[in-house]
Amino acid sequence: MPENSRPLPARAEHHAAHHGHDHDHDPGPDFWDKHAELPEARLARAEMLGISWAQPLNDPIWTDAYDHLRDDDPVIGLYLNRQARALPWWIMKNHHVANLVFDDMAVLITLCEMCSGSSAFRAEAGGRRLMFSLRGQYNGTILLEEHSTKTLWSPFTGVALTGALRGSALQRFPVLQCLCSDWLEMHPTTQVLHGDQALREGDWSAFGREWAQLKSLLEK
């Protein structure tokens, strides 16, 4: 189980249950690629990686205004270098992966709705920044790819599973999943991700439209 997997608030369970339909849209074996070093993994084909929910959240906008949040919004909280940051589920579920920079430090945050797990790591190796995105599924959860090395990584152990960096491990940072109101009580000056309220609808409405277009394209 991921380090911070635990029973979630009712709203988080709702997000996970509703958003889980995305993972239930299994197109079948013809839509997945394999990897020689990780044969059990299912890698999304290039056509699938163009869908919105496969795009990472890169260097987003942060704000100290909370009017776009609700008290019962589940958030992923990170306290690092005496600074508090909160990433609402309803924003992260549209990306699964966030590539962030805090005080010149590269940070990776992941979210898997299949298991409700989230993790944070220092996204650096050999003194250079690593950039990640969703690549597929493995071991009952999401699978990440690092762009520059094309290596596959576990989203919760922070360990490279393939390629030149295989066996390398990222430095872990602690995260806390809780309600927005609880996080604000602990960290009243926190920065939070800014997001348009339309994102609350879930990427499943967009996913449904994009999936229909993709399926039509691949069946031609």
Image (cartoon, grey):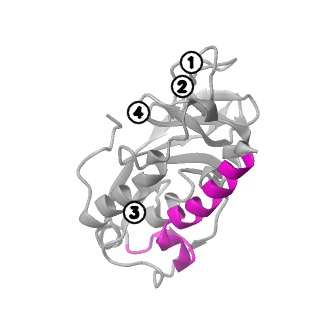
What residue sits right under mark 2 in the picture? Answer: 41
Q: Quadrant of residue 5?
A: top left
Could you tell me the amino acid type at mark 2?
Answer: Ala
Alpha carbon separation for disc pair 4 and 2: 10 Å
**Quadrant where the C terminus lies?**
top right
Alpha carbon separation for disc pair 4 and 1: 14 Å
For marks 4 and 3, the one nearer the N-term is: 3
**Quadrant where the N terminus lies?**
top left
- Residue at (68%, 36%) from the top-left corner? 45
Q: What's the mark number on residue 140?
A: 4
Instruction: For mark 4, give the secondary structure.
Output: loop
Callout 1 touching callout 2 (CB < 8 Å):
yes
Alpha carbon separation for disc pair 1 and 2: 6 Å
Residue 56 as seen in the image, left or right of residue 114: right
The residue carrying pointer 1 sits among few (fewer than 14), some (14 to 19) or many (20 or more) residues within 10 Å by Cα, namely few
Q: Quadrant of residue 2?
A: top left
Callout 4 touching callout 2 (CB < 8 Å):
no
Q: What's the mark number on residue 60?
A: none
Alpha carbon separation for disc pair 3 and 1: 32 Å
Q: Nearer the viewer, mark 4 or mark 3?
A: 4
For marks 3 and 1, the one nearer the N-term is: 1
Q: What's the mark number on residue 75?
A: 3
Is 197 a magenta residue?
yes
Q: Is residue 58 visible?
A: no
Could you tell me the amino acid type at mark 4?
Answer: Gly
The location of residue 177, given as percent across then percent down, is: 34, 55
- Residue at (53%, 71%) from the top-left corner? 199
**Depth order, front residue of 3/144:** 144
Instruction: Give the residues in magenta.
Output: 188-217
Callout 4 touching callout 1 (CB < 8 Å):
no
The residue carrying pointer 2 sits among few (fewer than 14), some (14 to 19) or many (20 or more) residues within 10 Å by Cα, namely many
